[in-house]
Amino acid sequence: MTPFIETTLIAAREIADVLQYGWRSEFAEHGDVGAGGDRTAGIDTLAERIYIEKLSGFGKIDSEEAGIVGEGEATIVIDPIDGSDNAISGLPYFGSSIALERRGRVEEAVVVNLANGDCFYKTDAELMHGKIGSERFEPVVRRGHTTVGIFEKAYANPEFAMALLKRKQKFRSPGAVALSLAYAHYVSFVIFAGPRRRYDFAAALWMCEGLEMIVEDELLIVAKDRDTASNLHRLAQGEKD
């Protein structure tokens, strides 16, 4: 585990510890529009402050809320709370996405699920999965015989969603795309249909290396095999099997 990843996980544990003390009304209070285009909630500000304090020594920060903070050769791309609406609504599927970039390339990345403690980190050498606060991490291994996929923003793409349902393809739309991509090695597929922001995708999409990916302007399909990815792409285009 590198110093950057270790420090990121320490920051994530600090955030998780704060949230475990119980929900506070200020976590849901919204302020100004952040760099990513959404209004910043109190829980975003809390997480962002902790990540900036812990990680600013590794490079300049590019955060979804504050934008560029500090300076340095490396850039740390942060979505402090991925799925903040879930967090505010009490739905246990939200986390953080952090990527360390050098010369425009992601070299280290962390995605954590602050609701259940799942942690994923990736370097050029390995993709690992463990728990917040644990020293035990294991290599991520693709799961076979999975029956459920993830379709983020399915509500905004009803025709595509209906095409999947007609094929009796089970899917969920949990509302935190970085987390969903981090789980891509486990589920049948991950689909995202809509505009993409780098804060949501920098870390997690890099974790999908080795999987089949179809990347278009407003469509992303990640699957374990080429046939599944191609079939999903045809459905997205309105074609029949």
Image (cartoon, rainbow, N blue to C red):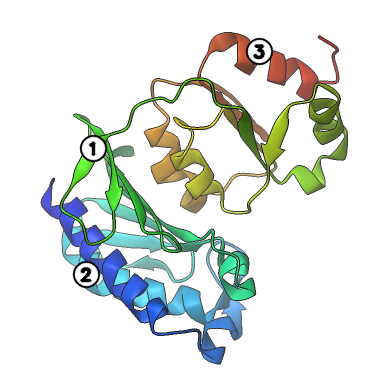
Which residue has dot 2 on it? 54
Secondary element at image label 3: helix
Q: CA distance from mark 1 to mark 2?
A: 25 Å
Q: CA distance from mark 3 to mark 2?
A: 42 Å
Secondary element at image label 2: helix
**Residue 197 visible from this viewpoint:** yes
Does the residue at mark 3 contact the one at mark 2 (Cβ under 8 Å)?
no
Which residue has dot 1 on it? 138
Q: Going 56% across and 47% down the picture, which residue do you hit? A: 177
Please give left or right for residue 204 compared with residue 101 in the image. Answer: right
Q: CA distance from mark 3 to mark 1?
A: 30 Å
Q: Nearer the viewer, mark 1 or mark 2?
A: 1
Please give left or right for residue 11 compared with residue 213 in the image. Answer: left
* Front one among 59 and 119: 119
Secondary element at image label 1: strand
Q: Nearer the viewer, mark 3 or mark 1?
A: 1
User: Looking at the rendering, which quadrant does residue 83 occupy?
Assistant: bottom right
User: Looking at the rendering, which quadrant does residue 33 occupy?
Assistant: bottom right
Please, what is the three-letter code of the amino acid marked with disc 2? Lys
Q: Nearer the viewer, mark 3 or mark 2?
A: 3
| Residue 34 screen position, x and y as percent | 55, 70
- Which circle marks residue 230 in the picture? 3
Q: Going 48% across and 48% down the picture, which residue do you hit? A: 179
Q: Going 54% across and 63% down the picture, which residue do you hit? A: 92
Q: Going 13% across and 45% down the picture, which residue do you hit? A: 1
- Which circle marks residue 175 in the picture? none
Q: Is residue 192 above or below residue 116?
A: above
Q: Is residue 39 above or below residue 108?
A: below
Question: Could you tell me which quadrant the C terminus lies in?
Answer: top right
Q: Is residue 234 above or below residue 20?
A: above
Please, what is the three-letter code of the amino acid marked with disc 1? Glu
